[in-house]
Image (spheres, helix red, strand yellow):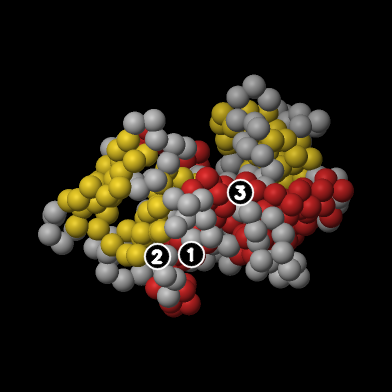
């Protein structure tokens, strides 16, 4: 046994992150009688809890993200998984046979395997006034804040599936939605593009971007720059919703596991990273599509692979003894 390993704080598997991927991994691992701990810096469910309505989760006609997260959490706990939320990780050591994770309070947990499911966060424009008006007219979540803009005119920034789908969703509240996109084409599925174009409440300003946000106590206008001509215009608006992608929450893993140029964790078909016994799943990994269902699928594979690794390791140790 590793001389620095505390039996009480040692687990077969530690899952870092408690979103849909993390909870799924916890369910599969603990149900397989594997001693499992989920360490989560936020609330269980991750960004899923911000989704007001989920209508495309197989087998479930309609459910909120908060409800789905609670069900998944209860499942994990019922199988014996431990969950510690609102923690802060101070340091990690993931190479070698025994992995260790130290929290900001000094507590260290060790394990034979680790599954990284830290997800991602909304990408910002990073322009003048954005930090000032976050929560005062600027939002990154339509389901969270759409109702605040009932009867208002708003802008949506982005050209992918999220931007167009959320723009359509926001027409339930806003009287007018103007989509601002840096290209003259969209990176969304055709059905999403057509739905947005056919909505009478939606207008488009293409080949353009927002360069500044203005207002007093709340957002009142934006500066829009045409990327072809360089000309700018002041555009009055009551709110701005920004959907321009995400940033994977992988900063703590730099120089620990292999990342691509976007900071996404590189995994193989078994969700294995470049470190033995370390897996990753969900929105933090390198992949094309990011949905709750894909996160759940990734985590299922990661948990099964980790389970196999744990059983083989224990069998090897047994044979050596």
Camera-nearest residue between 121 and 76: 121
In front here: 102 or 208?
208
The answer to whether the residue labelled 1 contacts the one labelled 3, judged by CB atoms less than 8 Å apart, is: no
Tag 1 secondary structure: helix
Q: Nearer the viewer, mark 1 or mark 3?
A: 1
Q: Earlier in the sequence, mark 3 or mark 2?
A: 3
Quarter holding residue 111: top right
Q: Nearer the viewer, mark 3 or mark 2?
A: 2
Q: Residue furthest top?
A: 105
Q: Is residue 111 visible?
A: yes
**Residue found 65% across the figure and 58% down from its top:** 53
Look at the numbered disc 3 and give the secondary structure of its residue. Answer: helix
Q: Residue 14's spot in the image, x, y percent?
A: 70, 43
Q: Can you say whether 91 is above or below 156 in the image?
A: above
Q: Which mark is residue 304?
A: none
Q: Check contact, mark 2 vs mark 1: CB within 8 A.
A: yes
- List x then y, in percent, for residue 217: 39, 30
Residue at 57% in and 35% down: 92
């Amino acid at each position: 046994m590793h001389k620095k390993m505390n039996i009480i704080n040692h687990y077969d598997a530690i899952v870092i992150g408690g979103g849909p991927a993390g909870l799924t991994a916890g369910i599969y691992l603990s149900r397989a009688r594997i001693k499992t701990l989920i360490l989560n810096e936020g609330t269980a469910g991750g960004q899923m809890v911000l989704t007001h309505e989920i209508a495309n989760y197989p087998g479930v006609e309609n459910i909120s993200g908060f409800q789905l997260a609670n069900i998944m959490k209860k499942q994990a706990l019922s199988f014996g998984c431990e969950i510690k939320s609102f923690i802060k990780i101070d340091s990690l050591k993931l190479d070698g046979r025994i992995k260790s994770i130290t929290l900001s309070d000094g507590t260290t947990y060790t394990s034979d395997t680790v599954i990284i499911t830290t997800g991602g966060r909304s990408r910002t424009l990073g322009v003048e006034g954005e930090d000032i008006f976050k929560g005062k007219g600027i939002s990154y979540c339509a389901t969270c804040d759409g109702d605040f803009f009932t009867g208002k005119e708003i802008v949506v920034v982005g050209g992918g599936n999220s931007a167009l789908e959320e723009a359509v969703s926001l027409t339930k509240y806003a009287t007018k939605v103007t989509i601002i996109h840096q290209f003259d084409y969209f990176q969304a599925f055709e059905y999403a593009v057509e739905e947005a174009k056919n909505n009478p409440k939606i207008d488009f300003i293409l080949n353009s971007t927002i360069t500044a946000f203005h207002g007093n106590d709340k957002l009142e206008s934006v500066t829009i720059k045409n990327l072809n001509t360089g000309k700018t215009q002041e555009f009055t608006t009551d709110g701005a919703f920004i959907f321009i992608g995400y940033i994977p929450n992988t900063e703590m893993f730099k120089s620990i596991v292999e990342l691509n140029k976007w900071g996404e964790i590189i995994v193989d078909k078994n969700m294995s990273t470049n470190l033995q016994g370390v897996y990753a799943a969900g929105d933090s990994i390198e992949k094309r599509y990011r949905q709750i269902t894909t996160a759940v699928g990734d985590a299922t594979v990661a948990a099964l692979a980790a389970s196999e690794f744990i059983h083989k390791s224990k069998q090897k140790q047994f044979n050596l003894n």
